[in-house]
């Protein structure tokens, strides 16, 4: 192993090697003269690159002790408290729900019978790519010429803040509705009418935020005999009723 120590003398005229490997004698060069430059072996070249460090060490700098303490560090040492550099800057995100609950049991049988006459009260869960993050149950039936469809979905976000942001984005995409007071942390409902081949369908959507969870209700209806749709009031009240059941079930299972 090579063990050279280089010393730079700013006002001097020569460069000396204090200790060197056994590779032949070295000559000092008089001031003002030059000699052919001989490439150094890799360890010596690296040592030469580090010569400023050696100079600083000779001047009294202690490189291994780290940077000089700042005023903040001195203040921390006086009061006896320190802060870890790896400590999180903010508190842990609030998260009341780790996974989506079973949606088919979230609406009472009484509500299902009143909103979707003729439907099986057990409902049918729709397959999801990730049941921990999103689960949906559906009820639909045609009784006579009246058709009704009800969906209840639970969506789980990583934090209450993310759920609030998603909630605001959703209601921004569904303009024309209004707030639903007393529904979770925040509630919103909107009703729209569509017509296809002269057949009307009216659909209501209710979105509620409960901590880091979102509850989304979709309720629609059509009359295939009259080609008309149920009134806005009927659809809106039905969707809000299902939403209140679902929010109560979610909060009750917290």
Image (spheres, rainbow, N blue to C red):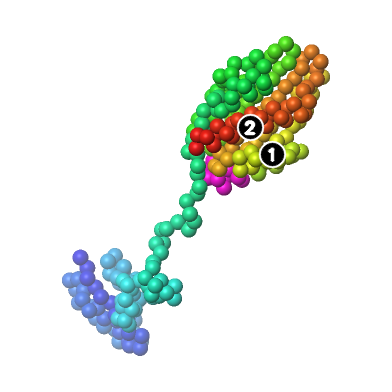
**Overall secondary structure of the magenta stretch?**
helix
- Which residue is most to the top? 144
Q: Position of residue 121 (x, y in %)?
A: 59, 18
Report the residue at 53% width, 45% height from top: 159
Judged left or right of residue 241, residue 128 is left
Please state which of residues 248 and 225 is positioned toward the viewer in this rendering. Answer: 248
| Residue lying at 74% horizontally and 13% vertically, measured from the top left | 145
Which sits earlier in the primary sequence, circle 2 or circle 1?
Answer: 1
Name the residue that disc number 2 marks: 243
Local crowd at mark 2 within 10 Å, few (<14), some, or many (≥20)? Answer: many
Q: Among all residues in the image, which is located at the extreme left?
A: 22
Residue span colored magenta: 157-166
When the figure is inspected, residue 144 is found, relative to residue 29, above or below; the finding is above
- Residue position for label 1: 180
State the residue lying farthest toward the front: 110
Q: Are marks 2 and 1 in contact (CB under 8 Å)?
A: yes
Q: Gap between marks 2 and 1, in whole Å?
A: 10 Å
| Quadrant location of the N terminus in the rendered image | bottom left
Q: Quadrant of residue 56?
A: bottom left
- What secondary structure is marked by label 1? loop
Residue 106 x %, y %? 56, 28
């Amino acid at each position: 192993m090579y063990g050279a120590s280089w010393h730079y003398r700013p006002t001097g005229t020569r460069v000396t090697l204090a200790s060197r490997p056994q590779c032949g004698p070295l000559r000092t060069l008089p001031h003002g003269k030059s000699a052919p430059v001989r490439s150094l072996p890799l360890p010596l070249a690296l040592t030469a690159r580090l010569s400023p460090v050696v100079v600083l060490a000779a001047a009294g700098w202690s490189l291994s002790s780290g940077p000089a303490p700042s005023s903040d560090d001195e203040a921390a040492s006086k009061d006896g408290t320190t802060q870890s550099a790896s400590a999180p800057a903010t508190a842990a995100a609030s998260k009341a729900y780790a996974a989506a609950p079973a949606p088919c049991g979230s609406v009472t049988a009484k509500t299902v019978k009143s909103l979707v006459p003729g439907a099986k009260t057990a409902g049918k869960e729709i397959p999801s790519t990730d049941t921990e993050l999103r689960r949906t149950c559906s009820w639909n039936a045609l009784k006579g010429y009246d058709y009704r469809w009800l969906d209840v979905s639970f969506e789980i976000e990583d934090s209450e803040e993310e759920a609030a942001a998603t909630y605001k984005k959703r209601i921004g995409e569904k303009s024309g509705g209004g707030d639903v007071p007393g529904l979770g942390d925040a509630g919103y409902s909107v009703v729209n009418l569509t017509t296809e081949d002269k057949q009307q369908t009216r659909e209501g959507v209710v979105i509620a935020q409960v901590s880091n969870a979102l509850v989304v209700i979709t309720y629609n209806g059509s009359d295939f005999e009259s080609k008309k749709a149920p009134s806005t009031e009927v659809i809106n009240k039905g969707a809000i009723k299902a939403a209140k059941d679902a929010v109560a079930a979610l909060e009750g299972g917290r």
